Image: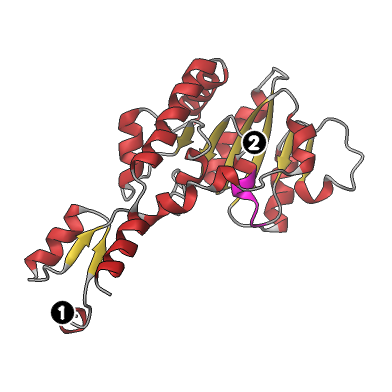
Amino acid sequence: MKKYLKAFHHFFVQNESSKNILIKQNFTNCTVMGDSRYDRVIDLPNQNNEIRYLNDFKGNKKCFVAGSTWEKDESLIIKFINSYEKNDVCFIIAPHQINLNRINELKQLITKNTILMSELAKSNAINPEVIIIDSIGILTKVYSYADIAYVGGGMGNTGLHNTLEPAVYKIPIIIGNNFEKFPEVKELIDLKGMISINNIKSFTNELNELLNSNEKRDQMGNINYDYINANLGACEKVINYLKEKK
């Protein structure tokens, strides 16, 4: 492997620990650039995020979006939805796998008025309380409607999904307890922009607290957005290096 690495003129790495690994192998031609994912997501709020049917669906309600969910995530979310008694929140679930059988099963498990995203345009459903996303490629737009986001994958071993996409919309984020491979998640939990839960009790307590506190939602959302802003610049570092070497 080392002989192949010698073919590269320069290495751009995300953090100091990666740089130190290279230096220990006598590769000093390396620069810490940071993570280009921050540069990619920062402009998401500036794109056209409107989904016409979601405007009416949300109305004046708070919106909870659960993105990239798996069965273990959905088990918690459905229990909460079915037990929630107020009429001040709308719910959107975006399963990671768009499997028709699983989506129909989810719909049957939810006791509130539930509709699939694909049915919205042609349906006469009155005041749905829950939407299940059954198409791909729109989750980043859906996050723009959220007041609170849950990012799936952390309740099992499937792997936590992208937390930066909802974070850029200045909203609090809830995740499961399997996040050890994600340094940005650890940092955001320490900063109190993100919350990790491990069972239905902790999920219910944390979500209810967020739903009942505009101040806490705003505080957590600002922490998440500021964190992304503080980590911008990876792409610019690469471009500047290449310009200097021309």
* Amino acid found under the numbered disc labelled 1: Lys
- Rendered image quadrant of residue 55: top right
- Residue at position x 52%, y 41% from top? 166
Q: In this view, does 31 lie above or below 208?
A: below
Q: Where is residue 176 in the image (x, y as percent from the top left)?
A: 44, 39
The quadrant of the rendering that contains the N terminus is: bottom left
> Which residue is denoted by mark 2 in the rendering?
145
The quadrant of the rendering that contains the C terminus is: bottom left
Q: Nearer the viewer, residue 242 or 193?
A: 242
* Amino acid found under the numbered disc labelled 2: Tyr
Q: For label 1, count other residues whose C-alpha is less than 10 Å away and answer few (under 14), some (14-19) or many (20+).
A: few
- Residue at position x 67%, y 47% from top? 48
Q: Is residue 137 above or below residue 80?
A: below
Q: Position of residue 7 (x, y in %)?
A: 21, 83
Per the rendered image, the range of residues in magenta is: 136-141
Q: Position of residue 167 (x, y in %)?
A: 47, 39
| Left or right of residue 100: residue 142 | left
Q: Nearer the viewer, residue 31 or 136?
A: 31
Q: Nearer the viewer, residue 130 or 76?
A: 130
> Which residue is denoted by mark 1 in the rendering?
2
- Residue at position x 41%, y 54% from top? 37
**216 in the magenta segment:** no
Q: For label 2, count other residues whose C-alpha is less than 10 Å away and answer few (under 14), some (14-19) or many (20+).
A: many
